[in-house]
Amino acid sequence: GITPTQGPGLPSFVWQHDSQALGWTEPLDGGGERWVALDPPYGAAPREVTRSAGGIGRFGWTERGTALFTQLAERGTKIRYFVVAPDRSANLAWEGAVKDVHDDPGRAVRRDGNRGPIVESDRRILLMSDGLSDDGPRPHVDALDLDTLEIERLLTAREGVYERMVALVDAKMSTILTVRESETEPPRLFSVQTATGEHTPLGALSNPFPELDGVERRNVSFERKDGVRLNGMLYLPRDRDPAKPLPTLVWIYPAEFTDEEYAEQMDARRFRFHQIKEASPIAAVLDGYALLLNPTVPIIGEGETANDTYVPQLVSSMEAAIDYLVENGISDRGRIAVAGRSYGAFSTANLLVHSNLFRTGIAISGAYNRTLTPFGFQHEKRSFWEATDFYTRM
């Protein structure tokens, strides 16, 4: 498998599944790291797998013994993927911004779900991606040639549906299993031939949430006062009277960005069936509420001081969302609640303290006194002693 590094200068360990070699990372004099491995019966000196002038992040072998690793650069904002050649040189396969979800190469396919090693066949591995764009997700499956580093597209979801790969059926990568869904059709399993794209449905199709039939769902976008474009998923009860504004629930979870372009990117929920895995805010729609689910709440800034503008950006994002709801006749400004879990709960509390936008708030499983998390929280890297005023204001 591939394991995350534990920190600068601290070794991480990984097993090579076929040979049972033990690998780990070591810092190099003058900077950078090397990856070494100890072969069974573990009595000889370790061999060098590769080395990097930068750090080595996640690393490991495919099931056929090809070494792969990632590298973070530019203070963690960029990520690079490397394939190690037989001569131990590290060849760059892809690089991009960590937060750029529209240019994501995808996740390597593994044995046994996410537990086993990366599958390799005929010097190729498979990559699964959500294929996000401004027009919504177009999931796809690619094959990466480990020698030429060229990528071949094997499967792309039809426009307007969300189809993702869930399993590999055979070692030659000729047959895969996918799950296809849309906003009105629940997920259904298919067997797909990668050479021809032929789909064979497996099993019966049933709707696990018939109570939501007729509920209106639409992706909406709006702009906050600094010009950043935001979006979210709006749910409306069936048979509502468009002339009557509704009580409204806004469910939030902010995210940090260093670049406005990435902050404006749409998430993966478009074209997907109702995603309900536990107690869900979507239940409020059945009680006659409008629901704005997971509107983007970007906190944009550079470096260690990015969070210093957390409160004004949080409030500004919610002002834009509420203005959209009220101006479009969906909500009554005096009957809007905000809610969230964890960091969303912390943000709910901040909105109640630092604004008068909401009638009430529902904060679930949050940490609210940041002096009790003095060594950093979420993406805040400074300690309480380095940013005392910030912590006490929060």
Image: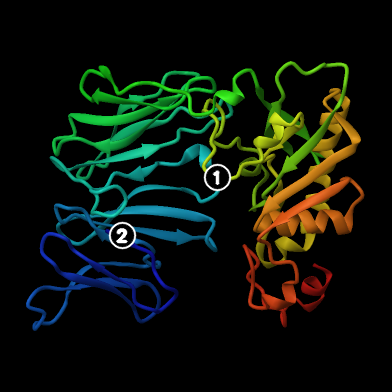
Q: Name the image quarter holding the C terminus.
A: bottom right
The amino acid type found where label 2 is placed reads Ile
Does 238 sit above or below residue 82? Answer: above
Horizontal side of residue 261 vs 112, given as left or right: right
Residue 296 visible to an observer of this rendering: yes
Residue drawn 76% across and 32% down? 289
Question: Residue beneath label 1, please?
Answer: 278
Residue drawn 62% across and 63% down? 378
Tell me which numbered mark, 2 or 1, is placed earlier along the sequence: 2
The amino acid type found where label 1 is placed reads Glu
Question: Residue beneath label 2, please?
Answer: 2
Q: Secondary structure at mark 2?
A: strand
Give the total of numbered labels: 2
- Locate residue 115, reporting x and y percent: 29, 55
- Locate residue 202, reporting x and y percent: 28, 23
| Label 2 packing within 10 angstroms: few (<14), some (14-19), many (20+) | many
Q: Secondary structure at mark 1?
A: loop
Q: Disc 2 and disc 1: Cα gap in Å?
A: 30 Å
Residue 301 visible to an observer of this rendering: no
- Locate residue 83, reporting x and y percent: 26, 53
Does 94 sit above or below residue 44? Answer: above
| Label 1 packing within 10 angstroms: few (<14), some (14-19), many (20+) | few
Horizontal side of residue 276 vs 92, given as left or right: right
Q: Name the image quarter holding the N terminus.
A: bottom left
